Image (tube, rainbow, N blue to C red):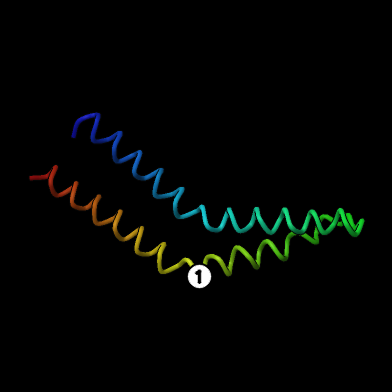
Amino acid sequence: MDELSAITIGKEAIRTAMMVAFPMLAAGMLVGILVSILQVATSIQDVTITFIPKILTVFITFVLALHWIIRLLTGFTREIFHLITAIGS
C-alpha cells in the first residue's frame, strides 16, 4: 500500500462520515433556527426549550435516513474489504 492509497482511503472515510452525519446535522440546525426565531418572536428565552425539538428531529431524521445510511456504509465497507484483499494478494 502506497501513500496515495492511504490518502484515498482516508479521504473516502471522511467523505462517508460527512455524508452519514449531514442529514441529522442539517435537520437539527434547521429546527434550532426555527425554534430560535419562535423564541425571539414570543420573548421566551428558556434554553431548554430547544433541546426536545432538536432531539426529536434528529431521531426522526435518523430513522428516515437509516436505509440510505446502511446502504452507504455497506458500500464503503465492501470497498475497503476489496482493497484489503487486493493488497494481500
Q: What element carries label 1?
A: helix
The single residue placed furthest to the right in the displayed view is 43
Q: Residue at image x 29%, y 55%?
A: 77
Is residue 28 left or right of 63 when viewed as pictured? right
Label 1 is placed on what type of residue? Leu
Quadrant of the drawing holding the N terminus: top left
Q: Which of 89 and 40 is in front in this view?
A: 40
**In terms of image quadrants, where is residue 69?**
bottom left
| Residue 28 x %, y % | 64, 57
- Residue neighbourhood size for the residue with mark 1, other residues' Cα within 10 Å, grouped as few (<14), some (14–19), many (≥20): few
Whether residue 47 is situated above or below residue 70 in the rendered picture: above
| Residue 84 x %, y % | 19, 47
Q: Residue at image x 90%, y 58%?
A: 44
Is residue 84 left or right of 89 when viewed as pictured? right
Q: Residue at image x 40%, y 64%?
A: 68
**In terms of image quadrants, where is residue 6?**
top left
| Residue 46 x %, y % | 86, 57
In the picture of the structure, the residue carrying the numbered disc 1 is 64
Whether residue 46 is situated above or below residue 63 in the rendered picture: above
Q: Which of 64 and 86 is in front in this view?
A: 64
Quadrant of the drawing holding the C terminus: top left
